[in-house]
Image: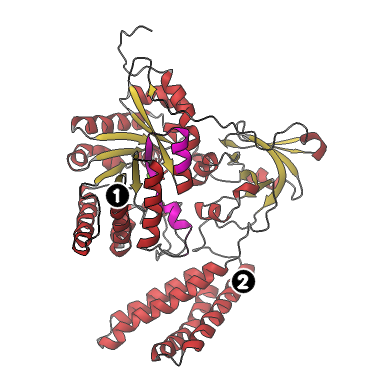
Amino acid sequence: MKIIKGIPASSGKSAGMIFRIKNSSESGQTGNCPSSLSIDLEIKQFNDACSFVKNRLLQHVDESRIFAAHLEILEDITDRVISKIERDKVDAISAVREICNETCALFAEMEDEYLRSRSDDITDVCRQLIFELIAHNENPYATMPAHSILIADNLLVSDTVLIDKSKLAGIALRKGSKTSHVAILARDHAVPLVLGIGEAIDDIPDDAMVVIDGDKGEISIVSYESIIPSVPEQATIEKKADKAPAITKDGVEVKVYANAGSLADVEKAISLGADGIGVLRTEFIFMQATDFPDEAMQYATYIACAKACRGKILTIRTLDTGGDKPLPYAPVKKEENPVFGLRGIRFSLASPDIFKVQLRAILRASVLGNVRVMFPMITSLAEYRTASMLLEECKSELKNEGVAFDSSLRAGVMVETPASVIIADDFARHASFFSIGVNDLTQYMLVVDRNNPYAENACDSFHSAVLKSISEATASAARYGIDSSVCGEMASDLRATETLLKLGVRNLSVSPRQIPFLKEQIRKCVFYIDNNYKR
Ligand code: PEP
Ligand code: MG
């Protein structure tokens, strides 16, 4: 039996046939540099999208002159998009987007007002093409059989949207990292995950039967007969709900919230005994869509989440796209260093129209429950102020429209950058609460990529600089009498619980599955360093 070693990233042991994805969308559905073979495929997909859009426009051409104009634009840009794919070796979606930006920029400089306004039509035609390209992009996971162990170089969160998780017995990755969003999702769904396998992943034959051990970080290539009797299909332990408060041995209640990415997560967390939702990662909701979800769609989701919380806190984090969570339809140019780029609040402030749609939906949902809004990746007070100003603008709009909302909706910041720790007092004077995001805080504090398996040991949330940051942000919040909690994977790690409590942390936000385990762990811990309690 051959054993291949990697990094353990999500517990559990299971067996299955391997299902290998050769060209996973490592850089998202866009921005890839396809090989010469797939360039032909990109051009074919673009031509198919063009034919589809053209036929649809032709059907409407008698209704309005605008459709004829759109046909002209389509004709004008077709060759340019194809040359861009060939010359720059980019995928079709990126090529359409770049040609759209270039053309709109040209028109924007024109003196003639009519010509200047043509840029809306160009954007419209390009949007139709992108829509078609996204909708008809083949789902490479569609043929994955049940009980598969998925093998890939790396996965993005957008890949996980395409995967039928009921068929997934495990994941093995050449790259990846424990605090990547894919690893977080694997743990949330109790899918065993081994990552950072490196070149050895090529030694696994395509038709192999393997056992994946997410606790040891091992992949064993075995014979069918040897595994069937011995390995349970999904050996990950689920624990029963625990609705009692989590009180330390010295009598301090610690609130246990959940990190959620969907309505299903919220429902699961509340049924397992969560005190509320510490972070609703709304980007996962955006990833289910083919374009930015409109206000009605977002409102429907947020209000359903608020209902599911039954009066408990629901913290809705505004869109944290970028980094390893790109949105295939977002108009963002390919960035050299996306983790340092247009991520989180930076994207929202650069796209106020998109941001305001989300803020309005959150405000409308706030009427029902104990809703809070939270801004991700904040690094300056100016960012917080601008975000709050846009929130106020949305409140005035809703008020004028006679739409109900909670006028005292609390707004908080994610403390997940070194800057936000250093000026935590300034934020604490203005914001209603903090959520300390230890995943990103570790990445940015220690200058290690949270997605790089080779930096796995360096990406250490127990580093004294990270612990000191957690302690300082928690102390700032306490000084100004605002709430603070710790989210990120460290909060789910039971080895970290007592350390976090000793740093003064009284609110933790974790993966829904981990809630009963964490409550049990808290009850074994002591909160105060120096105490004379007797039990
Ligand atoms: C974090 O950074 O710790 C966090 C909770 O946010 P995310 O993992 O979604 O970046
Ligand atoms: Mg973060």
Q: Nearer the viewer, mark 1 or mark 2?
A: 1
Q: Secondary structure at mark 1?
A: loop
Taking 392 as reference, is 451 left or right?
Answer: right
**Residue nearest the viewer, comparing 413 with 259:** 259
Q: Which mark is residue 366?
A: 1
- Residue projecting furthest to the right: 225
Look at 28% across and 88% down and name the residue there: 114
Instruction: Locate residue 337: give its quadrant.
Output: bottom left
- Image vertical order of residue 25 relative to residue 442, above or below: below
Q: CA distance from mark 1 to mark 2?
A: 46 Å
Residue 468 percent across, percent down from the top left: 31, 29
What residue range appears in magenta?
267-290
Visible residue check, residue 234: yes
Instruction: Locate residue 291: give its quadrant.
Output: bottom left
Residue 234 is a magenta residue: no
Q: Which residue is mark 2?
A: 41
- Image vertical order of residue 217 relative to residue 328, above or below: above
